[in-house]
Amino acid sequence: MRCLLVSDLHYTLKQLDWVERVASQFDTVVIAGDHLDISSTVALDAQVVVVLKYLQRVSRKTRLLVSSGNHDLNARNADNEKVARWMSRVRQLGIAADGDVLELGDTLFTICPWWDGPLAREGVGAQLARDAERRRGRWVWVYHGPPEPSPLSWTGQKFYGDTDLVRWIELYQPDIVLTGHIHQAPFRSGGSWVDRLGDTWVFNAGRQIGPIPTHVIVDTDEQRASWFSLAGNERVPLDQVLTRPPAELLEPPLDPRPS
């Protein structure tokens, strides 16, 4: 399986154009939250309409999985917790989204919503417990927030991640967790795009300006993950027994950046 991870596109249409253009090169494309931008002058409802059109076009080229992030919350539920209600419209397009579980070959994908309160957090915990019963081979989570503490959640000044995610990873030990949220982490001293918690690999591509988003390519056949950015490209072998920090395992990627 060759999987493309991007996140935090924040209504950057040129970056969405790039995702659509390269989507057919991958077995799976994951957009791990923050499709919208609450600071934009474009109304959220209008952003949703445009993003849905992009997601539909990408899904025509490959299998697409999307989760919500904190910028995607556009309503409140009966418990007065913020939710990304528009994700139900994503699902209506036949795209796997918040709360879904998907089996692709020997890989089980669990797509977690961004939670804004204790009841939604309990829902994510129940979702993971449910999907743990279905696990047969590789298990991959899509979860917008990175773990804390971790280089993936380092802003350059403080860690800003998710302690509940650490607890769930320790409990269920998924193979891979695909995250985002902390834009700066791969570019800051002490930060990174890759981490490993026990036997679980965790990735956060970060965010950059320009028409090509930072992105991670996870290739389970070649057992490598590669990160591409304006600051440079790196890769890490997934079959490496981790006796050193991931940063010490990084190598220049051999494959060219997707065009």
Image (cartoon, rainbow, N blue to C red):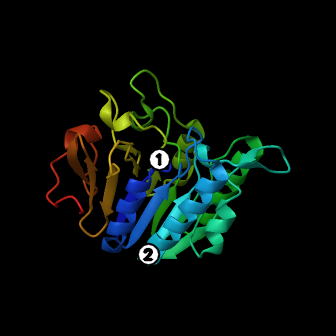
Name the residue furthest top.
Answer: 157
Determine the image quadrant of residue 81: top right
Give the labeled residue for mark 1: 8
> Crowding near pointer 2: few (<14 within 10 Å), some, many (20+)?
few
Say which amino acid is labelled 1.
Answer: Asp
The image shows residue 13 at horizontal and vertical percentages of 44, 55
The residue at 29%/27% (across/down) is 189
Identify the element where label 1 is drawn: loop
- Point out the frontmost of discs 1 and 2: 1
Mark drawn on residue 16? none
The image shows residue 22 at horizontal and vertical percentages of 32, 67
Give the side of residue 54 with respect to residue 205, left or right.
Answer: right
The image shows residue 152, relative to residue 205, as above or below, that is: above
Give the side of residue 74 with respect to residue 162, left or right.
Answer: right
Q: Kindly tell me whether residue 254 is visible in this rendering.
A: yes
The residue at 35%/50% (across/down) is 213
**Near-viewer residue (105 or 209):** 209
Image quadrant holding the C terminus, namely bottom left
Determine the image quadrant of residue 155: top left
The residue at 34%/74% (across/down) is 24
The image shows residue 101 at horizontal and vertical percentages of 59, 68
**Near-viewer residue (170 or 112):** 112
Q: Kindly tell me whether residue 112 is visible in this rendering.
A: no
Give the labeled residue for mark 2: 106
User: What is the spatial separation of the Cα atoms under label 1 and label 2, in whole angstroms?
Assistant: 28 Å
Identify the element where label 2 is drawn: loop
Name the residue furthest front.
Answer: 41
The image shows residue 257, relative to residue 64, as above or below, that is: above
Say which amino acid is labelled 2.
Answer: Asp
